[in-house]
Image (cartoon, rainbow, N blue to C red):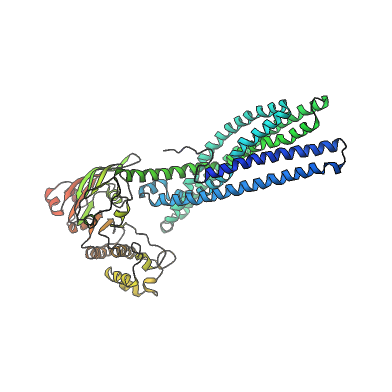
Amino acid sequence: MKRTRNRGLPRYAGSGLLHGLLIPLTIIEVAAIIAQAFFLARAVTFLFKGTPIAEIWSDVGFFFLAFILRYMITHVQTMLAERFAAKTARMLRNELMRAYFGSHLFFIQQKGVGHLVTLTMDGVDQVKTYAEIISIRMIKTFIVPAVIGVYIFTLDVASAVILVVAVPILIMFMILLGKAAKAMADKQYETYKRLSNHFIDSLKGLETLVFLGRSKKHAEKINQVNTDYRTATMRTLKVAFLSSFALDFFGSLSIAFVAVGLGLRLIEGSVDLLPALTILILAPEYFAPIKQVGKDYHATLDGQVAMAEIDGLIADQGQNKNDLHQHTPLAELSEASSRLNATLAFDDVTVELNGNHLLNHMSFEMQKGWIGIIGPSGSGKSSLISVLAGRLQPTSGTIRIGDDERAALDFPEWFDQIAYIPQQPYIFPVSLADNIRFYAPDATDEQIEGIVGQIGLADFVKTLPNGIHEHIGEGGRMLSGGQEQRVAIARALLSDKPIILLDEPTAHLDVETEYEIKQVMRDVFAHKHVILATHRLHWMNEMDDIYMLDAGQIVDHGTHQALIEKQGAYYEFIHWKGGRKL
């Protein structure tokens, strides 16, 4: 769904107080501007009439006092806006991080990792700039011209009419050119998102590209995306410069009309020099906030787009959280449920993403033990594991744990029961021990060493200079695929959580390593409730129960032997895979 652009004053925590302070400060500022113009015009008028300089020092003094007061207030306004913008930026980054970590994998894939990183870094900075600028400019645009216009009206009606009539013309050009700039800025932002996603994806696959000899060819694609972004930026800047020229031109033209009118009436003697000079000094101040908003509009276009997207993303995640907890009150899982004496059941669960049904009206009751989830690619295996891991929220249906009924498995008590091992576990750039402590940060070194022995990493640890405290991952000792999987198994084992979720845990391993990992899992998770999604058929003999998925639905269910004898979808799938004997 396309986001609408956020306009107007930012509405975040503290914005009401900020605007409440800026309004009276702006009123005082415009009073200082008028006083500054009046005393300057008065001093010049007296000098023109031949008054000695000694007699106008008071006017000069009042002028400088008004000048100092004006810029002191401007400084205070800027300081308040900067503090609000910085606080808002910190809040948005925190909210975005919560939203990202609370999002399911498919959401991140849909948005693109590069775009989400860019939104958190550059996008928040753009919103910060927007909040800092627009909070002051919008208020000044409404108050300063209005107060100055009223004051000029008391001095000379004709000049006031010229200034008031000029405003709609300026606004009309701001709208016309603003729409063109908006369209180009939106296109530029889309190109920027594509560039950021493309760059991150390129970094991820850099080794593979070099290995396959495609790095130079891929560099040409990166250069093309970069050229598209540069071209879009230049088009946007052209419109921005044109808009600024139009605003300056019509503003200067209006001031010229006022000046000519006042000059002619001064010659005729129908207006005095003091009010005429005061009006001429105030006329540029009248248009200054309007022209500045026009210039700032282009400077903050990216901030408007980023603010709309950030607000929408946070709102979507917040709504999802509300939907989850409105279904049933959050209750503590009973001890029986936590040890899985209760049944885990899906009742008509559907997961839909972008019009595609990842899971389609799925219903089952899953008992404890080793459960196999099998099916062709795209059948919904990973989606089911993601729902069980609380990373993917159902569109409809309910999930029951014993008598506890929920819309999704996204709550702390459930997370306390599960350990999740994905296809490619992430290795943090810290020590081996700290990696294993992922689920149990208070585990002792003795416990870590015991786990290391259980999962078959003891010989590897002996080769490390610092043992379990050796730095691994990025910037440290690199691990093989099998060693990474053993670390993930160690995390789950150390956590002592009763439910183990495995999503293709051996998909990227060679046959020998896979066999070793399989034996380790069978030993260390023998008394756990293990739910394994895989396309490797040799696992099925180890399963207490098997669910065969196709197109997001359960098409076969039972033990391996019973499904073979039934000769249904599971039997056909085995023969389709090559007729291997298990």
Closer to the camera, 545 or 288?
A: 288
Does residue 203 appear in the picture of this structure? yes
Closer to the camera, 113 or 54?
A: 54
Residue 314, percent across and down? 43, 45
Does residue 130 appear in the picture of this structure? no
**Quarter where residue 231 is shown:** top right
Residue 347, percent across and down? 23, 44
| Left-right relation of 91 to 290 | left
**Residue at the image position 15 percent from the left and 46 percent from the top:** 568
Residue found at the far left of this picture: 565
Looking at the image, residue 175 lies above or below residue 25: above
| Quarter of the image with the C terminus in it | bottom left
**Residue at the image position 52 percent from the left and 50 percent from the top:** 87
| Quarter of the image with the N terminus in it | top left
**Quarter where residue 513 is shown:** bottom left
Looking at the image, residue 162 lies above or below residue 478: above
Closer to the camera, 314 or 159?
A: 159
**Quarter where residue 493 is shown:** bottom left
Q: How many marks?
A: 0
Residue 548, percent across and down? 21, 49
Closer to the camera, 94 or 545?
A: 94
| Left-right relation of 303 to 315 | right
